[in-house]
Amino acid sequence: MFIENFSQVASPLRRLTREDVDWDWDQKCEEAFYKLIRIVGEEITLKKLDYERVARKIKLAVDSSYIAAGAVLTQEDKEGKYRPLLYESMIFSKLESKYSQP
């Protein structure tokens, strides 16, 4: 799972895990906690394909290297934000990783 700017969002919570810091659940921790819940629960949760009469744009993003390949299929929602429909990834076998690269 990838969360954009995770280190910044989670920094108030990660600070609490340090040995040299006293445990103090403050407003910043509370905000970070609920922001992460929202991100995981709404923004990166897979949605189902919307077949409404008004066609929504669909994007396929792919990436690969000699080690692995990955893809994400997204669809534009009513607010114009692209939501994930499907994630795929594959780690290549030793033989597959030797295939030529362009």
Image: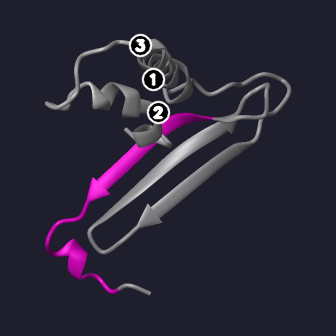
Residue sitting at 65 percent across and 48 percent down?
59
Q: Nearer the viewer, mark 3 or mark 2?
A: 3
> Looking at the rendered structure, which numbered label has been put on residue 9?
2
Residue 79 pos. (x, y %): 79, 27
- Quadrant of the rendered image containing residue 51: top right
Given the image, on which type of amino acid does mark 3 rest?
Asp
Q: Secondary structure at mark 2?
A: helix
Q: From what the image shows, is residue 16 above or below residue 82?
A: above
Q: Which residues are magenta?
A: 83-100
Given the image, on which type of amino acid does mark 1 rest?
Leu
Distance from the alpha carbon under mark 3 to that under mark 1: 16 Å
Residue sitting at 35 percent across and 12 percent down?
25
- Quadrant of the rendered image containing residue 7: top left
Q: From what the image shows, is residue 100 above or below residue 51?
A: below
Distance from the alpha carbon under mark 3 to that under mark 2: 14 Å
- From the viewer's perspective, is 100 left or right of 30? left
The earlier-in-sequence mark between 3 and 1 is 3
Q: Which residue is mark 1?
A: 36
Q: Which residue is mark 3?
A: 26
